[in-house]
Image (cartoon, rainbow, N blue to C red):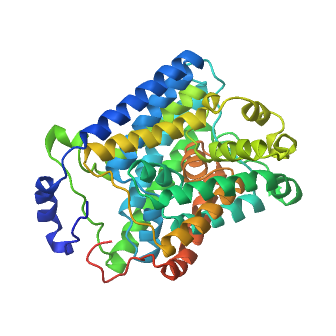
Amino acid sequence: MNTIAHPVNKMKSSIATQSSAMNPVQKSLVGGGIAASLLLFIYLAATQSMMQPVLLLIGLALGFTLFHARFGFTSAFRRMMSVGNGQAMRAHMLMLAAAVTLFAPILAFGISFFGADIAGYVSPVGVSLIVGSFLFGIGMQLGGGCASGTLYSIGGGRTVMFITLLFFIVGATVGAYHLPFWTEELPAFEPISLATSTGLGYGGSWALSIALFGLIAWITLIVEKRKNAPKMAPLPTESGWKRIFRGSWPLFTAAIILAVLNALTLMTRGTPWGITSAFALWGSKVADFLGFDVAQWGYWQGANATALESSIFADSTTILNFGVILGAFIASALGGLFKFTKITLGNFSASVIGGLLMGYGARLAFGCNIGAYFGGIASFSMHGYIWGIMALGGTFLALYLRPLFGLSVPKSNDSVC
């Protein structure tokens, strides 16, 4: 469904009137999505540990939330770097503030549901991280979405994102093959945790993190005011309790929910939410099937070897990814919004390049917008902050590349962005 972009001064009335313009529920698709989710839940309960079906439920909730709020990382970075609109970036800061508040006691006391050892995402800071996150920033602007955006857009029927995902997997697989060079042959510092690598502890690092998020949010307000940035375009929605199932959710509401779900993921499987390690696994299994000696790659030595040898249904990140796609599919069908979209030569080419850059960059940078940026910062890791800075740099460069593929870039004189 296409929504009309109204001038800024007419936004309020447009929001109030859009509920009547919503599409009818796509009942057969909703039923199919629920049935597929139920069958997968039953299969996981019968063949895997109980942790896997629980993670499927969390994944469903993640996908449902991402779609309803259109909670973007790619669009947030693009709006900030192009016209100075920081509305979504402030939602990121709220999400991160809620996440560190929840993560701090979980990490400090090792709180878990299934007896798993609790560990945050704390990764080295070096050439690999800097190059990988910069490449990812370019890739997500060309590919049309980040890691989470790719999954929930597929759930919503955005056809070109299937191309992005395919080449995301290819890039992640090649990145896994090359990773030992980037991490062992090039300079890097040891992982730096604000909580355990300093004298701050979890309490002090929590306070510092909250202060940093507040500072960043304040800076976005200053930039937004000075640039007189256009507001974000309104989305169609329902009112009252119906809004839970149909229409858009406020970004700040989604920010809190995503933080809670990430904390539940941490307590369920012992590590935060991640996405792209599954892409490397899927691609490596295909490469192994095609005759490549994947088991000899440095990436698949040690603890990773078990995942390569096991079923993908035993991989917790894979199950979360399936859940995100299914949750977004159900959410889009409830809103009557599931529809395959047109592929052009421009967006096809951009998706191929963007997917490759994101997949390769995510492996080098120890994660994507979810595993490195969201999960890293929530885990008090310095690498998460550096990932965000470098991805913003990649986004800035990509603003000049997007028009080459027929992709739009927000302008300061737009009525909405």
* Residue at point 46%, 69% (across, down): 78
Q: Is residue 79 above or below residue 274?
A: below
Question: Percent x, y for residue 151?
Answer: 48, 49
**Residue at 42%, 31% in the rendered image:** 36
Q: Is residue 389 left or right of residue 122?
A: left
Q: Nearer the viewer, residue 155 or 367?
A: 155
Residue 385 quadrant? bottom right
Residue 263 location (% of width, % of height)? 50, 34
Query: Can residue 304 be seen here?
Result: yes
Give the quarter of the image for residue 98. top left
Query: Who is closer to the viewer here, 130 or 297?
Result: 297
In the picture shown, does residue 193 fall above or below 106?
below
Where is residue 254? Give x, y as percent.
35, 46
Task: Say left or right for 356 vs 298.
Answer: left
**Quadrant location, the C terminus:** bottom left
- The quarter of the rendered structure image containing the N terminus is bottom left
298 sits to left or right of 76: right
